Image (cartoon, rainbow, N blue to C red):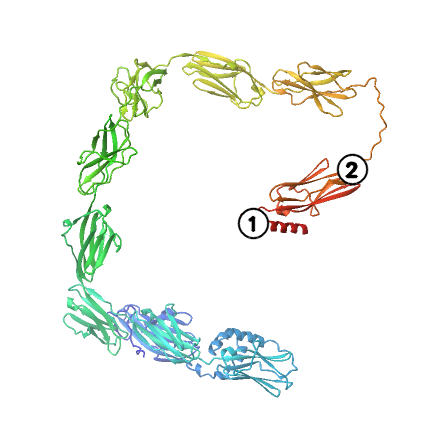
Amino acid sequence: MPEPVPADAPPADGEPGNTELTGLFVEKPPDNVVAVAGTDAIFIAKVDSTNLTRKPTMKWLKGKWMDLGSKAGKHMQFKETYDRNTKIYTYEMKIIKVVPGDAGGYRCEVTAKDKCDSSTFEISVEGEKKRPEKEEPQIDVWELLKNAHPSEYEKIAFEYGITDLRGMLKRLKKMTAPEPKHSEAFLKKLDSCYSVEKGKKIVLTCEVVDPNVQVKWLKNGQEIKPSAKYIMEANGNVRTLTINKTTLADDAAYECVVGEDKCFTEVFVKEPPVTITKLMDDYHVVVGERVEFEIEVSEEGAHDVELHKDHENPKYRFKKDGKKHTLIIMEATLDDIGMYHAWTNGGHTKGELEVLQDIADLTVRAQDQAMFKCEVSDDKVTGKWFKDGVEVLPSDRIKMSHIGRFHRLTIDDVKPEDAGDYTFVPDGYALSLSAKLNFLEPPKIHLDTSGNMVSQNTIIVVAGNKLRLDVEITGEPAPTVVWSKGDQPITDSEGRVRVEARKDLSCFVIEGAERDDEGNYSICVTNPSGEDKAMLFVKIVDVPDPPENVKCTAVGEDCATIVWEPPKFDGGAPIKGYLMERKKKGSSRWTKLNFDVYESTTYEAKRMIEGVLYEMRVFAVNSIGLSQPSLNSKPFMPIAPTSEPTRLTVHDVTDSTCSLKWLPPERIGAGGLDGYIIEYCKEGGDKTALCCLHHNDLSCDWVVANKDLCERQGYVVHDLPVGEKINFRVVAVNIAGKSLPATLAQPVTIREIVEHPKIRLPRELRTKYIRKVGEKINLTIPFQGKPRPVATWYKDGQPIDPKMVNVRNSNVDTILFIRSAEREHSGTYELVLQIENMEDRATVNIRIIERPGPPLKVRVTDVWGFNAALEWEPPRDDGNSEITGYTIQKADMKTKEWFTVYEHNRRTNCTASDLIMGNEYMFRVYSENLCGLSEEPCMSKNTAKISKTGLELKANPYKEKDMSCVPKFTQPLLDRSVVAGYSTAISCSVKGYPKPKITWMKNKMIIGEDPKFLMQNNQGVLTLNIRKPSTFDGGKYSCLAVNELGQDEVECKLDVRGRIHPGQSVTQQNKERQTITHTHIHT
């Protein structure tokens, strides 16, 4: 049962502090109020603020904890007014249109700093329990629905247990339709509707005209068969259908059928109201406990049950099990406090949930104070404190207090024996609140410094070995252990580097120590009472890294000098020395050079074979062991340098350069020759020193002229001072080093030698240079002279136009280039070569020619016998070339076929002989030059007719023969079979006069201008070419010849075979071809 509603309550901040209960209310709401459902209810409270230091705060509560201020809205309204004269605050709560759910206990609570007051009152709603007493069987739900507004359908369905509201509305629509015409088969039809409670019996009755007629009963259009549930009876004119033990499935439309006539009715099955057989209980729980509000209803599986709180919350779960309905709260919180309701269409119940805050566990250090605080539902509730089941009694250190709803247990100067479980048991309640007092012990690290520690905080581990540190840890509560490397915590419990936790132990493990594991490690243990920390340095020792940069610095005939750099990492131990090995290049067999440790980083290897390539490698040694071998040195060969270069000479000298040439050394040797180094120095300098100074300082030493080795036997030294005498020498270089130098006997004076300009004109350019129009002209004319001469071209005395002619000059020649020659490029070109006031000239005569124009005024001047005399004039345009001759041709006026009479005729006249008597001739003449004949001839203006003399021909009378003939195919078309994709042709021949018109057809359809087909007619031979036929081009082809005398036609069959694809047999291919051919024939 729920607890009685307390008269007073603490303020909103939860803890009363020193707030005292006083009488602040001047007017309170009445203790019991009876409100009528649907009307408004107003509750007024007044507070006197004369003795108050600040404005009071008013709260309206329902039950014990539900603050109604959050419910303000359309249903609840709150109002506050203040009278300055009387200093009285008036608070008003208004409930608009009271509903049964508003019934219950209420409390108004006022607080002002250190004072508070409260007042409780009860609200009852009239008619709250009258709804189940209504005489529902007397109400016809069907009539109620017919007269109700559509917005009230769902309310009526819920109140009277109607489940199929949608089907009921459909039937309602049918029944409101106009009634059918009067039937002659029925004396009395079925009623429009019937209503029955679930589980009861109902009888449907109608009267028919013919007492012997048979009727059919239908349910939703389906015929009903007689059974124990459905009983059909006929008594005279009366026909009845009895339905026993009705269920919701019997809620349907029924028909009685006589022949073509029907009568209809609707049966509505009502469920009885669902009543609550087991009411909801109140609950008092602690925060975090599970709560189950359970009720039982009269119907199993009932749907018209609503469980809800004063406000909705998605955290609640609902469960149905038969007649049981349960509202479940998994973990109760203070927000879940309030009233919970359950509604059915036949009842209502409610229960209150009160949630108490559990006592918090305490963890304290020695001599600190421990305080347990417990909040109860009412300030009048008393109780007792227990420790481990034994009642706690007050003493000098232990004190107990009760202020308002708060009970406190205070323990001063906490000692280890105070630790345990403390419980507060309220008097008269089967509920207790428990908490635990924990005593704190500072954490401590017990580090064992013996074993593999070389000092108090350094541990040496050989690379590859395992390190395991077991550190004992103490402290209460159990401290938290954190291992770190530097600032990075180590959290892995598995892997190569891990931390293992055991009871009172923390294990740090490194499997297969590596160099990267070296560093400072720390262990830090903490609990609420403090922390402890220890530092460790883990040193990893290993074999050293291999030496670096092994190379050969010098070689002899049977020896070599090898140098290298120490390894970057000595493995954590000093380097004791090195071991060396060598092998021949291409071999895999290494030979040790020393068995005792060699301490220096320079070693001279001896007893090697000259001309053989060797490689070296070095090992480093420390106290741990031998390192990996170094990288192999570059191959080197024990060999002596070459002899000096031979025949060093000066090839050319300018104001700043000197060109040298020489021959290879006489003795090169097995080491080969890599290149040459060219050096120079000013006369009077140190000729024995070899150094590289800046070019501007040549007073004493040799200067290297080339940065990279010169591989050719010639080199041009640049940037030399003008007028100075310079010594030069050349050194050969190979893998063994530098040879002796080859030196010039005398120094060279750096000064340009003046040489007169001279043009070396090629022989073919000394006469006219003739080219045809459109050809490319590329003239290269070498010259000589020092310093470099200036070459200038002129055409006909004027500088050449660079847009028409391209010129490129170099040190030794000049090039004149014309991409496409034109007539205007013809002329006299002059090359002028100048060096200061000296010059040389050369002339090139270029002529661009093309074909000449035709001759002029060709005419026949005389005809005699079988001869004709011709004359003409030279062409206006000779193509920029002399006319070399003419070509004369003749043609008979009948055949008009041209025949050459003369070629290369140099005169402008000729005589054509051997002409045929009786024929008339015309003539044409071509002009000719070096390019060839003119493009067009000149035709003679008159003709030469050879007259007949002394002969007379008497022709026999000629009778023209009638050649008319009906078209007739002399060669028919032949059937063919071809492969798809390969072009083919079909042919036939025809005769007929006049020439018949030919028409090709495919399957009796005329072949038009289809580019796939090419039709030819050559002297009566007709050919139809088909380009790359497909299987669809097969069929019957026919050729029709028609003239004005008649027609003839031939046809053939063309079979196009598809290509045989991989995996397809020839039989399948033939079947497909026959199918396609058959399809085309029928088409």
* 848 relative to 37, above or below: above
Q: Position of residue 348 (x, y in %)?
A: 40, 78
Query: Residue visible at 23% across and 47% down?
Result: 514
Q: Nearer the viewer, mark 2 or mark 1?
A: 1
Residue 897 falls left or right of residue 821? right
- What is the total number of numbered labels drawn onto the structure image? 2
Q: Could you say which quadrant of the image residue 928 lies in?
A: top right
Q: Could you say which quadrant of the image residue 984 lies in?
A: top right
Q: Could you say which quadrant of the image residue 1038 lies in?
A: top right
> Counting other residues with Cα less than 10 Å from the Cα at mark 2, is it few (<14), some (14-19), or many (20 or more)?
some
Q: Which mark sits nearer the N-terminus, 2 or 1?
A: 2
Query: Residue 1065: which disc?
Result: 1
Q: Quadrant of the N terminus?
A: bottom left
Callout 1 amino acid: Ser
Q: Position of residue 924 (x, y in %)?
A: 70, 20
Q: Position of residue 289 (x, y in %)?
A: 30, 71
Q: Is residue 61 visible?
A: no
Disc 1 secondary structure class: loop
Q: Nearer the viewer, residue 402 or 584?
A: 584
Give the residue pinned by disc 2: 994
Question: Label 2, label 1: how many angstroms apart (C-alpha)?
Answer: 53 Å
* 186 relative to 398, above or below: below
Q: Is residue 649 visible?
A: yes
> Counting other residues with Cα less than 10 Å from the Cα at mark 1, is it few (<14), some (14-19), or many (20 or more)?
few
* 1043 relative to 801, above or below: below
